[in-house]
Structures are given as structure tokens and as C-alpha cells.
Image: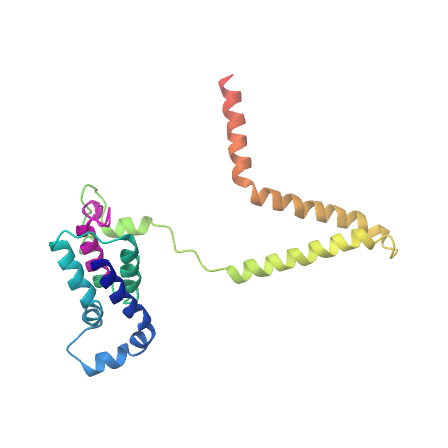
Amino acid sequence: KYDAVLTGLCSKILDGQGSINNNIVDEIASDATLTPSQLAMKKMNDPIVLLEEMNNRKVKASSRSLMALIDATATTNDPKTISKILSLTLKNGSLSYYGSLQSSITALPPTPNSKISASPMTRQQRLDKLADVPTDERAKEISAALATMGVGGTSFILQGVGNGLGLDELTFYTSILSYGIFGVLIVDNFFDAIQAFSSFVVKMNSER
């Protein structure tokens, strides 16, 4: 019975997901005392109360009701509410691990000149050692790919019909270009495998 009620409550939340999310600003305006996080908790109040009662009575939730609960919680987009639900689910015994590695996370030093525990480096020194965020060059990569496809396609077409069109002199160069593009594609796609094989060969020769 608990599972059926929990699944039903979560289904109602999922069914009303669109209207709740679209009217979240109106809800905040109508009740200025509630933050978005509190509104999310209010939205999940019934499942939370039911799950707490299940925990007190040692009633374990089924996988079906648990999936519905997680799906409903995800609609809130609120970290505190999600953490609350996951903690209750862990206590219920339906979840095996949650937050077990939080104690191993090193706290961020308060100031740039503060030293990190078990390290002589300051926070700023650690940040300076990090690699720069890569720039988004997808437009250039797509342009280069399209240009390569165009050149390669033209080369293959000329190889096929070049003799018939009287372009015999170009077929030699288009063949070299086509084989070159094909070789680059092989190296690009199998670079890791080629590198691993080369390292293996070097290692075998060094052991002899």
C-alpha cells in the first residue's frame, strides 16, 4: 500500500510538472516569504512525509516507487530537495551509496593565499597550475571537415571519370591527394592503437 501511495503522489507531481515549472515565478510572487528551494520542498512535501513514515515503520520502498520518486524530485531542479530525498532513500535501505565520499573532499581554502591541507602550495598556486579552459573551436573544426570532404570527394570523382573527360594529367595528383587524406584519417582514428603498438614493440626490443 505504501508503494502504491508513493507512486501515485509522484505521478501527480510528474503530471503537473509543466504547469508548476511555468508558474514558479508566479508562486514566488504570490508568497514572497518562500524561496525557490522552499517551494521545491513544498512541492515534494507529501512524498517526503510518506517516506519518513515508511522509514519509521521499517517499510522498504520498491524499485518502481523509488524510480518514480527520483523522477519527481528531479523536476524541482533544486539541489537541497534532491539531497533530502536521496538521504531519506538511503535511510530507507533502497539506496546503497550516497554521499559516502564527501568526507574525503578537501575544503576550499577561504583566501587565495591560504595553504591547502597536507600541501605547501596555496590556493592560488594550485589554480595557476591548472590548464586553461579550452576554447570552443567547433566552427573551425566543422569548416575544416567540410573542406576536407569537398576536396576528397572531388579527388575521388576525378579519379573515376577523369580519363573519360580528358583529365588524365590530374588523376595522378588526385590519387596522391586521396591516399594522403585516407592515411591521415587512419592515423587520426587509430592513433592510440598505433601508439600502444609502437610502445609494445619498443619495449619488446629493449628486453631482448
Residue shown at the point (18%, 80%) measured from the top left:
31
Position of 100 with respect to 127 (left or right) is left
Q: Which residue reaches farthest left? A: 56
18 or 208: nearer the viewer: 18
Q: Please provide percent x and percent y for residue 74.
A: 30, 63
- Tell me what residue is drawn at x 20 percent, y 48 percent: 93
Span shown in magenta: 82-107
Residue 184, horizontal then vertical, whole percent: 62, 45
- In depth, the one of 31 and 93 nearer the eye is 93
Q: Is residue 26 above or below residue 130?
A: below
Q: Quadrant of residue 47?
A: bottom left
Query: Residue 150: x, y in percent?
Result: 68, 58
Q: Residue at x 69, y 56 (%)?
A: 151
Quadrant of the image containing the N terminus = bottom left
Identify which residue, 24 or 91, lies in the foreground. Answer: 91
Q: Farthest residue toward the top?
A: 208
